[in-house]
Image (tube, rainbow, N blue to C red):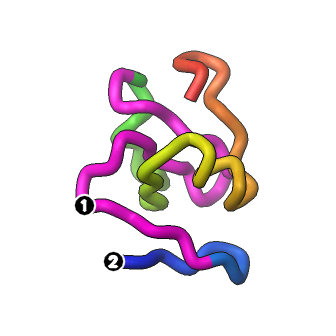
């Protein structure tokens, strides 16, 4: 499955290790308390993929 974000196709996995908040453009790792936030609908296989899509790491979990 692919997710289109800002014109970039990002490979997504069903329960990827990183979730991105589409409003704040912040990504979280699976141990973060914000991992399942309402707007965390972008899914990334790697932190590198999240950064390439324009997301920054969470300040709580470090992404």
Q: Residue at x 25, y 60 (%)?
A: 14
Q: Of the residues under marks 2 and 1, which one precedes in the sequence?
A: 2
Magenta span has 23? yes
Rendered view: 40 above or below 1: above
Range covered by the magenta-colored residues: 9-31
Q: Quadrant of the C terminus?
A: top right
Q: Is residue 60 left or right of residue 32?
A: right
Q: Is residue 30 left or right of residue 54?
A: left
Q: Secondary structure at mark 1?
A: loop
Q: Residue at x 53, y 19 (%)?
A: 61
Q: CB of mark 2 within 8 Å of CB of mark 1?
A: yes
Rendered view: 60 above or below 19: above
Magenta span has 3? no
Q: Secondary structure at mark 2?
A: loop
- Count residues near mark 2 (Cα–Cα under 10 Å), then give few for <14, some for 14-19, many for 20+: few
Q: CA distance from mark 2 to mark 1?
A: 8 Å
Residue 59 found in image quarter: top right
Residue 57 found in image quarter: top right
Q: Is residue 60 left or right of residue 55?
A: left
Q: Nearer the viewer, residue 48 or 41?
A: 48
Q: Nearer the viewer, residue 61 or 34?
A: 61
Residue 5 rendering spot, x and y as whole percentages:
62, 74
Residue under pointer 1:
14
Residue under pointer 2:
1
Residue 58 rendering spot, x and y as whole percentages:
62, 29
Q: Quadrant of the N terminus?
A: bottom left
């Amino acid at each position: 499955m692919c997710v289109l974000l800002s014109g970039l196709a990002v490979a997504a996995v069903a329960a990827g290790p990183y979730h991105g908040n589409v409003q704040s453009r912040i990504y979280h790792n699976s141990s973060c308390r914000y991992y399942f936030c309402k707007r965390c609908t972008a899914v990334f296989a790697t932190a590198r993929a999240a950064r390439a899509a324009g997301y920054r790491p969470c300040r709580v979990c470090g992404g």
